[in-house]
Amino acid sequence: MQIEITKQSEKDFRFLLSRLSHEIRNPVTLINSELQLMASSHPELCSYRQWDSLMDNLEYVKELLKELSDFSHAQTVTLVPVNPAEFLTTVLSCQKNTLDYLGIRLEIHVEHTSSPVFLDRIKMRQVIFNLIKNSCEAIDQPGGKIIVNLTPADSGICICIKDNGCGMTHKQTENIFHPFITYKPEGTGLGLAVTAEIISAHHGQIRVSSTPGQGSAFYIYLPTSPE
């Protein structure tokens, strides 16, 4: 009985979060449009230092609302059979130009598997993008590198995304998948929480190994069966 109450409370919380982000998004969009109109009519506004600060804060609110929406819908997935090697290679190819621009080397090591994996293509693409973005933000020195491995695992596959960035302490790794906890100056604290929720909806697991000053590795375990 207690489990049912917990599940219902979580469902109610997600619904409230979705409604809240939706209701706030409308006036924020309106404010953004009005500011753009003001800038068109009075270009001198853009030269004020306060204008840049205002627009930066507005962008932060928009990003926060987007991630709130992503979090509230993270458990809703449509699973279809996918060739994991082809899927991962395609997704990572979209990131290569960005990583080249940032001076970060991408290494991909893919082992082909005999069985398909049941994925929500859009949500799992978001997971990979979130983890690549997280690695990019952790790399703040020349010679940055991200290594992505796909290997068979017990009754499924393992995707490992490893970087040589700043790394994290043990205490930080214990909390990074919790919502609204971030160790970045401008982070929302929702990116990795959304990632963990999506993987949970795929009946999978995510783990992290990290050493300060050496980098982090995220391990995604996904079953070949949708159940």
Image (cartoon, rainbow, N blue to C red):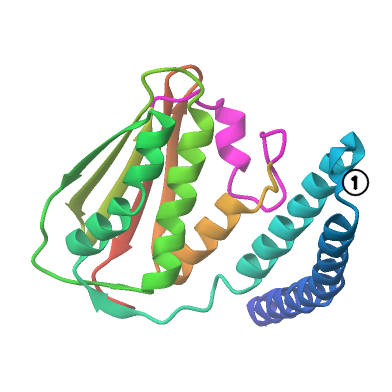
Q: Is residue 32 visible?
A: yes
Residue at (67%, 34%) from the top-left corner? 183
Q: Which region of the structure is painted magenta?
A: 164-186
Q: Establish if 5 lies above or below 39.
A: below
- Image x and y of residue 46, in percent: 84, 44
Looking at the rendered image, the quarter that the C terminus falls into is: bottom left
Left or right of residue 80, residue 155 in this image: left
Local crowd size for mark 1, using a 10 Å CA cut-off: few (<14), some (14–19), many (≥20): some
Q: Establish if 78 lies above or below 37.
A: below
Quarter of the view holding residue 222: bottom left
Residue type for callout 1: Leu
Residue at (58%, 39%) from the top-left corner? 174
Quarter of the view holding residue 182: top right
Left or right of residue 103, residue 108 in this image: left
Q: Secondary structure at mark 1?
A: helix
Q: Which residue is mark 1?
A: 45
- Image x and y of residue 15, in percent: 73, 80
Residue 181: within the magenta?
Answer: yes
Residue at (46%, 25%) from the top-left corner? 165
| Residue in front for this viewpoint, 69 or 45 | 45
